[in-house]
Image: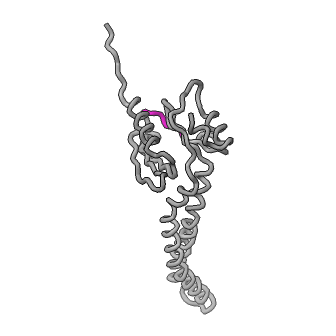
Amino acid sequence: MSGLLRLSEAARRAAVKALAPAEPIVYVTAPDPREAARNALPTLGAGVLLAVLSLPIAWACLAAVWQAIHNGGSLILPALFSLLAVPAFLFGLYLVCAPWAAYRRAKDRVVLITDRRLVLISIRSGVEEALSGRAILGVERKSIERGFGTLEIRHEAKGDEAETTLTGLDNVMAAELAIRRLSLDHSVTIISPVH
């Protein structure tokens, strides 16, 4: 319960609202937004590289299209390269926004683990995802840096296997242990024999 007291007032209200009656909290936290943004820095680097490499190509291709229109030349090759280079540049710009998006997502999220389920809560819109212990197939700790960590949770989703990544978690080992315990407690159903 002490984790609940460390949350902001809005996050506490969202967590309490997501709880079922008599559902005890095992672990609760709000991911650190700066750590989530820091984890997205490699994506930012890839976006910058893609944008920087594709911008001159896109610029040259668009100039070639412009020249072909004014001089009556063939548009096929310059237009084809433009259709490849311009979207690559725009996708690079999209990837550049990854740290900002991770920061905003972490600022709006609460991770709640009870004895029955793992709940990912949006402070603004309520429960985003609720995984019962039976749905969780495994959890893996990816990294621990500066006291914060990343967990990858494999789970069933509509008959398929999906993966949810939680970044910027403080006390990540306690979260991993709580999720492992949750998945193990519900993984085996014992049927007692009838006499």
Q: Where is residue 193 in the image (x, y as percent from the top left)?
A: 31, 13
Q: In terms of depth relative to the viewer, which is nearer, 72 or 104?
A: 104
Q: Position of residue 195 (x, y in %)?
A: 31, 7
Image quadrant assignment for residue 192: top left
Nearest to the observer: residue 91 or residue 31: 31
Residue 20 screen position, x and y as percent: 58, 28
Tell me: 171 left or right of 12: left
Q: Main secondary structure of the magenta part?
A: strand
Does the stretch in magenta take in 112?
no
> Which image quadrant is residue 161 in?
top left
Picture residue at 54% right of the left edge, 39% below the top: 28
- At 55% from the left edge and 27% from the top edge, which residue is drawn? 23
Q: In this view, does 8 lie above or below 76?
A: above
Over which residues does the magenta segment extend?
129-133
In the rendered image, is residue 130 in sight?
Answer: no
Spot the residue most to the bottom.
Answer: 71
Confirm whether residue 139 shows in the render. yes
For the point 45% across and 56% down, the residue is 145
Residue 132 is inside the magenta segment: yes
| Number of on-image labels | 0
Q: Which of 89 and 132 is in front in this view?
A: 132
Snapshot colouring: one colour
- Which of the image's four quarters has the N terminus? top right
**In the image, is residue 23 above or below residue 84?**
above
Which residue is painted at 35% across and 28% down in the image?
A: 188
Q: Position of residue 61 (x, y in %)?
A: 54, 83
Residue closer to the observer: 79 or 38:
38
